[in-house]
């Protein structure tokens, strides 16, 4: 007779053996190619909603579920997809030129719930992103796009322009810099925390070893400081607001604050009184598949702005009411579209989609597509082991060497649609010659190449080279030359005295620069800055490098404490740089203000002819370079790595910045399965059958 | 007893308010805010839109005002909407807590299973080779930074090493499971071996040394000497007399360990790509998602207070001498 203990031990051994056997089955099963393509991605935000998707990885999934009217082609132009967009110029009653876009959908498209796609879905899309209650990533739409009747819809008032003009007038009369009362000014400063400058900590620091109390005393308010409780945040803020009001009122903008506030109240009041403008007057439904969109002025990106995503109104719009998008926002997890793939689920950090057999371009070759979150550090392991098939790791020299050694992996490099730059805040470094001198100390080539190798190039104008408007033959404006830099500094009023570079009042040239090198100089511009710091020291000046985290850099840039900073622009698909370089541009971080430049920047988006536009862009960028507020650093490349042992390489398209496998994912297939060890174990339903079925040849892919 | 618990709960509540003030101030003091960070790369952004976004997210308010409105909603059970996920924080915590809890709980069970017997074994033969080996390993575990140790585990057991375990993720993406089956469970298990080992090895040291110390104390106690003098077999002396008394402080310690497992999850979950509260918390702190950070940290604070309270109550249960 076996004792109890022995029976237990036997059972345990049995369980262990079973576990090992079952595990090893799964091990081989998980690795074989099949009808499931696995794409490695980074952090999802799980906002799987066409109106609110923001993050690039959520977007990867949504791009396969939704179709838009047109899509961007390999050369960054729009081509037909779910429909077509055409335009004609028309004369308005007062004689000025308007542009009428016609959006025409392809017939026969269906959403995956079986309902047909109609033009109402397109109009619904425009309405949601123009809604005053909408706060998703396209919320700039109603205020930046010049569609007839759009602002009336947004403000819910047919005579909004008079009302806004009135508000503007009232605000100006009451809150303009020269008339605003002390109380209103201080209320504004307190409400905005001194435009974000005040950090809320009474014992905190304005600058290194320089507290708020020090600042208040130095500004001559020491007596008042003694009267308040310096530990009380609110009291400190109130006093600081007073200091700022009395000493630096010109640096603040209470008018915009009160304008925004008044407009918000105005819209709210309009909506509370019942909806008066229910439709956008410039958007007209022609038939079930066609609508027209009337622009009040020429906009070279008008077609991109009207390029709607086909979103089912019957699904997302069920409970939508103007001014309240909460019912749409509530649905972040089960998108329905008309794209090549159909949503299945998001679980365990894996987003799953399955083929939409009714997709209007043809049935996809893959039965399942899955996007799996893989930590950056493990991407290459996951690719090499066959856990994932495609990924886009950030490219560097070593990575390319690793991939070259592995015959199962292949890669594509394509230019990133963005660029890196060094910027100078012209409000801090006011003299243009001093700025030119600083830029002449920057030895970009070795720094960029040393970091990126051959996957980045130094560029000469602040614009991504992936745009057709990038100036041809642009040459170096400020070559690395310390002697020339000294000349510039001298022109800027600096002289060398006792080994120090000083201005007329005897102050040494000292400039700080913020760079996001994670504290260890991990940045393509870092070597350049250390060299510049050494050179400037030799000349008698001082360059203080602040190697910080991104958020710290951001704060220093926004509050103006950074004299220079190294950053990059991404996703710049248009040549319209007005927000960056216009005097009052929303992203003007350098304080650049040049009338000729403002004029050019206003004209560029209205110049339809490419050659003419290109000439204007070249001119504008020359002015930016001349003002010496920005030094373009690098144009880097992105990388796509494929596991070609699993993916059928012949089904992958030729890749460029704007055209990757994702644009034709429905044509991508896995290699036919020859190995018996497919993941077709009893309880896995991923079958390889679909991958080998019906390979159509289609040559339309770019 | 009832009065004691009532008093403790009231004190905990006051502590929680204090903690929330501290947390809110810290979170708001982070440089830059969510809107500045998310709109940084957007060329199309205008000041006007940015300001109105800040207003929509409640970032235009000062710290004091912001805190008051936060605590007011929190007291009404509304922790706000996460900036990043645009979902109610309570919903996110409810959705991901089970994953984090499951991982943490399994790790905790393993920790106890490893720490208690080894701690006792080390104590039984104090200053022997066995004792030194166990204690040295415990120290190594405590001293190893988790991110470093995780990389070693990945290198040894992952594709570039023995190739027997997946290095990240929770499930083999390629396999499609139609329902929850044994194979799926095994797939989960395989993916969790490394993260849980990481947890257990790096944190088992504390509990192990605690067990050892308490066991040593018990072994030197008079009642153990009496038991031995009575001629009881050594097994009985250890298991019945010494061990039971060692258990009392160990139980209280384990109670207090649970919240720390949740907070420790932030790094481990990110390293291994697990879809839990910790990974979200790390992302939220990078991007200044104030509502989520507040919600998550308050959740930890409540767990910590509840953990100590439960431990104190358990103390009375396991130790009949304790009365409140």
Image: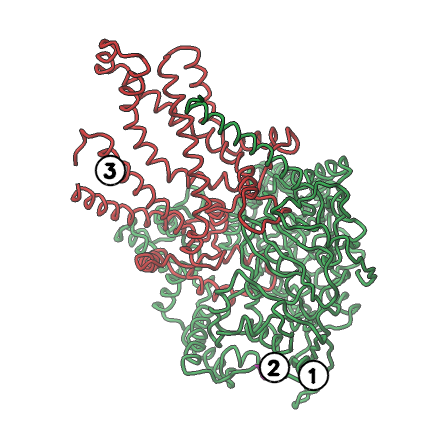
Residue carrying label 2:
A148
User: SS at mark 2?
Assistant: loop
Q: Residues within 10 Å of mark 1 (few under 14, many from 20)?
A: some
Look at 38% across and 11% down and name the residue there.
B127
Q: Residues within 10 Å of mark 3 (few under 14, many from 20)?
A: some
Q: Is residue A239 visible?
A: no
Q: Residues within 10 Å of mark 2 (few under 14, many from 20)?
A: some
User: At which x and y percent is residue A67?
Assistant: 67, 66
Pick whichever, A558 or A646, lies toward us: A646
- Cα separation, mark 3 vs mark 2, equals 70 Å
User: SS at mark 1?
Assistant: strand
Q: Is residue A533 above or below residue A130?
A: above
User: SS at mark 3?
Assistant: helix
Look at 41% across and 61% down and name the residue there.
B58
Residue carrying label 3:
B313
Q: Color of chain A here?
A: green
Residue carrying label 1:
A97
Q: Is residue A631 left or right of residue A252?
A: right
- For the C terminus of chain A, the quadrant is bottom right
The magenta stretch is: A280-284
Q: Chain of mark 2?
A: A
Q: Is residue A648 visible?
A: yes
Supply the letter of whichever chain is red: B
Q: Main secondary structure of the magenta part?
A: loop
Pick whichever, A489 or B124, lies toward us: B124
- Cα separation, mark 2 vs mark 1, equals 12 Å
């Amino acid at each position: 007779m076996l004792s109890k203990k022995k029976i237990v031990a036997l059972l345990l051994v049995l369980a262990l053996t079973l576990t090992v056997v079952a595990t090893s089955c799964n091990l081989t099963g998980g690795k074989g190619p099949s009808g499931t393509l696995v794409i490695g991605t980074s952090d999802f935000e799980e906002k799987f909603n066409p109106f609110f998707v923001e993050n690039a990885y959520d977007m990867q999934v949504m791009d396969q579920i939704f179709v838009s009217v047109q899509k961007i082609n390999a050369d960054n132009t729009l081509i037909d997809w779910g429909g077509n967009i055409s335009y004609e110029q028309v004369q308005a009653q007062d004689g000025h030129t308007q542009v009428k876009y016609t959006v025409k959908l392809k017939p026969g498209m269906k959403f995956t719930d079986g309902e047909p796609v109609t033009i109402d879905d397109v109009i619904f899309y425009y309405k949601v992103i123009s809604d005053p209650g909408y706060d998703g990533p396209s919320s700039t739409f109603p205020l930046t796009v010049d569609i007839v009747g759009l602002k009336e819809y947004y403000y819910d008032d047919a005579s909004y322009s008079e009302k806004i003009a009135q508000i503007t007038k009232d605000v100006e009369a009451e809150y303009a810099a020269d008339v605003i009362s002390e109380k209103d000014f201080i209320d504004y400063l307190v409400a905005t925390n001194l435009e974000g400058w005040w950090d809320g900590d009474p014992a905190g620091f304005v600058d290194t070893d320089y507290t708020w109390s020090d600042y208040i005393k130095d500004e001559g308010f020491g007596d008042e400081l003694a009267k308040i409780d310096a530990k009380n945040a609110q009291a400190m803020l109130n006093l600081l607001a007073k200091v700022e009001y009395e000493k630096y009122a010109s640096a603040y903008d209470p008018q915009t604050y009160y304008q925004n506030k008044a407009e918000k109240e105005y819209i709210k009041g309009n909506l509370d009184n019942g909806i008066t403008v229910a439709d956008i007057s410039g958007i007209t439904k022609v038939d079930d598949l066609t609508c027209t969109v009337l622009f009040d002025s020429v906009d070279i990106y008008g077609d991109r702005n009207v390029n709607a995503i086909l979103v089912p109104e019957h699904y997302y719009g069920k409970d939508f009411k103007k001014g309240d998008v909460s019912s749409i926002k509530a649905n972040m997890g089960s998108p329905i579209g008309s794209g090549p793939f159909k949503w299945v689920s998001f679980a365990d950090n894996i987003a799953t989609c399955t083929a939409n057999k009714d997709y209007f371009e043809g049935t996809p070759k893959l039965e399942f597509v899955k996007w799996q979150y893989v930590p950056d550090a493990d991407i290459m392991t996951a690719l090499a082991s066959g856990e994932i098939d495609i990924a886009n790791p950030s490219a560097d020299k070593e990575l390319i060497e690793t991939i070259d050694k592995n015959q199962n992996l292949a890669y594509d490099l394509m230019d990133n649609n963005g660029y890196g730059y060094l910027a100078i805040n012209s409000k801090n470094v006011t003299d243009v010659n001093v700025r030119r001198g600083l830029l002449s100390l920057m030895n970009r080539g070795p720094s960029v190449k040393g970091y990126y190798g051959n996957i980045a190039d130094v560029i000469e104008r602040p614009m991504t080279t992936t745009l057709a408007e990038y100036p041809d033959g642009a040459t170096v404006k400020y070559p690395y030359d310390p002697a020339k830099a000294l000349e510039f500094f001298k022109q800027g009023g600096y002289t060398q005295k006792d080994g120090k570079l000083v201005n007329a009042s005897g102050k040494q040239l000292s400039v700080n620069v913020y760079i996001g090198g994670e504290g260890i100089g991990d940045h393509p511009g870092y070597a350049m800055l250390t060299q510049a710091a050494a050179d400037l020291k030799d000349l008698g000046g001082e360059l203080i490098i602040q190697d910080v985290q991104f958020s710290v850099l951001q704060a220093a840039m926004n509050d103006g404490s950074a004299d220079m900073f190294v950053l990059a622009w991404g996703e710049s698909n248009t040549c319209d740089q007005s927000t960056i370089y216009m005097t009052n541009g929303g992203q003007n971080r350098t304080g650049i203000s040049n009338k000729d430049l403002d004029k050019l920047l206003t004209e560029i988006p209205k110049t339809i002819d490419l050659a003419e536009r290109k000439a204007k862009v070249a001119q504008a960028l020359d002015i930016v370079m001349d003002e010496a507020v920005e030094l373009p650093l690098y144009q880097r490349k992105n990388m796509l790595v494929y596991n070609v042992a699993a993916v059928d390489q012949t089904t992958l398209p030729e890749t460029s910045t704007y055209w990757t496998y994702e644009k034709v994912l429905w044509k991508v297939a896995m290699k036919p399965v020859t190995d018996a060890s497919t993941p077709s174990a009893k309880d896995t339903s991923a079958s390889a059958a679909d991958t080998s079925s019906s390979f159509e040849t289609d040559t339309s892919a770019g | 007893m009832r009065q004691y618990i009532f008093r403790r709960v009231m004190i905990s509540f006051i502590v929680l308010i204090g903690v929330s003030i501290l947390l809110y101030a810290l979170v708001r003091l982070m440089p830059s805010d969510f809107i500045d960070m998310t709109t940084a790369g957007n060329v199309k952004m205008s000041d006007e839109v940015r300001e109105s976004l800040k207003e929509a997210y409640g970032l235009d308010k000062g710290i004091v005002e912001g805190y008051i409105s936060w605590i007011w909603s929190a007291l009404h059970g509304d922790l706000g909407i996460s900036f990043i996920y645009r979902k109610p924080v309570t919903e996110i915590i409810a959705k991901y807590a089970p994953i984090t809890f499951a991982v943490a709980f399994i790790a905790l069970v393993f920790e106890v299973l490893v720490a208690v017997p080894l701690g006792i074994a080390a104590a039984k033969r104090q200053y022997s080779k066995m004792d030194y080996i166990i204690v040295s390993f415990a120290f190594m575990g405590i001293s190893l930074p988790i991110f470093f140790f995780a990389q070693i585990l990945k290198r040894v057991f992952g594709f570039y090493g023995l190739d027997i375990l997946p290095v990240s993720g929770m499930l083999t993406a390629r396999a499609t499971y139609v329902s929850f089956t044994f194979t799926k469970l095994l797939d989960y298990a395989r993916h969790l071996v490394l993260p849980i080992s990481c947890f257990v090895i790096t944190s088992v040291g504390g509990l192990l040394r605690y067990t050892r110390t308490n066991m040593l104390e018990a072994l030197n106690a008079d009642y153990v000497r009496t038991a031995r003098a009575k001629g009881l077999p050594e097994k009985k002396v250890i298991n019945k007399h010494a061990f039971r008394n060692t258990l009392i402080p160990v139980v209280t310690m384990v109670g207090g360990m649970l919240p720390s497992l949740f907070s420790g999850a932030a790094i481990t979950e990110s390293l291994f790509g697990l879809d839990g509260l910790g990974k979200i918390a790390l992302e939220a702190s990078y991007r200044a998602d104030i509502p989520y950070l507040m919600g998550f940290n308050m959740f930890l604070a409540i767990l910590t207070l509840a953990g100590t309270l439960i431990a104190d109550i358990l103390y009375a249960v396991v130790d009949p001498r304790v009365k409140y």
